[in-house]
Amino acid sequence: MTPAALRIEDAVNDACPWSGRPVSADALTLYNGAVVGFCNPECRDKFARAVGAFEDALQARRAASSGVAE
């Protein structure tokens, strides 16, 4: 599903997890198969950066635990 195809009525939340303000149709993302809304694109992008950082950290930890260098 492309970002343009995401619909605000499909969002699992009504309030932005960062600010608590109502979600906006131009600030939606797909996360683990669910549409998640944010109050503005900056909050959406902040979420994407945070998720990316956690995924990178998990991958590095798994690699280190398995003895495989990245």
Image (cartoon, rainbow, N blue to C red):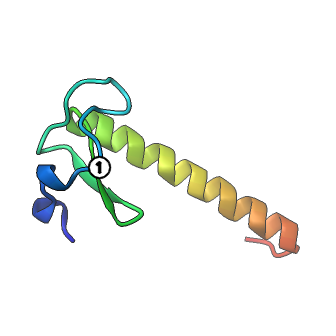
Give the image quarter of residue 14.
top left
Q: Identify which residue is drawn at 42% across, 63% down.
A: 32
| Numbered disc 1: secondary structure | loop
Rendered position, 66 above or below 12: below
- Relative depth, front residue between 64 and 38: 38
- Relative depth, front residue between 10 and 56: 10
Specify the amino acid type for callout 1. Val
- Residue matched to label 1: 12
Q: Residues within 10 Å of mark 1 (few under 14, many from 20)?
A: few
Left or right of 44, for residue 47: right
Rendered position, 67 above or below 15: below
Tell me where residue 18 appears, x and y as whole percent.
37, 29
| Quarter of the rendering occupied by the C terminus | bottom right
Q: How many marks?
A: 1
Left or right of 10, for residue 18: right
Q: Identify which residue is drawn at 76% across, 66% down.
A: 62
| Quarter of the rendering occupied by the N terminus | bottom left
Tell me where residue 7 appears, x and y as whole percent.
12, 56
Q: Identify which residue is drawn at 12% across, 44% down.
A: 26
Left or right of 20, for residue 52: right
Left or right of 24, for residue 65: right
- Relative depth, front residue between 61 and 35: 35
Q: Identify which residue is drawn at 49% across, 50% down.
A: 51
Tell me where residue 46 appears, x and y as whole percent.
38, 38
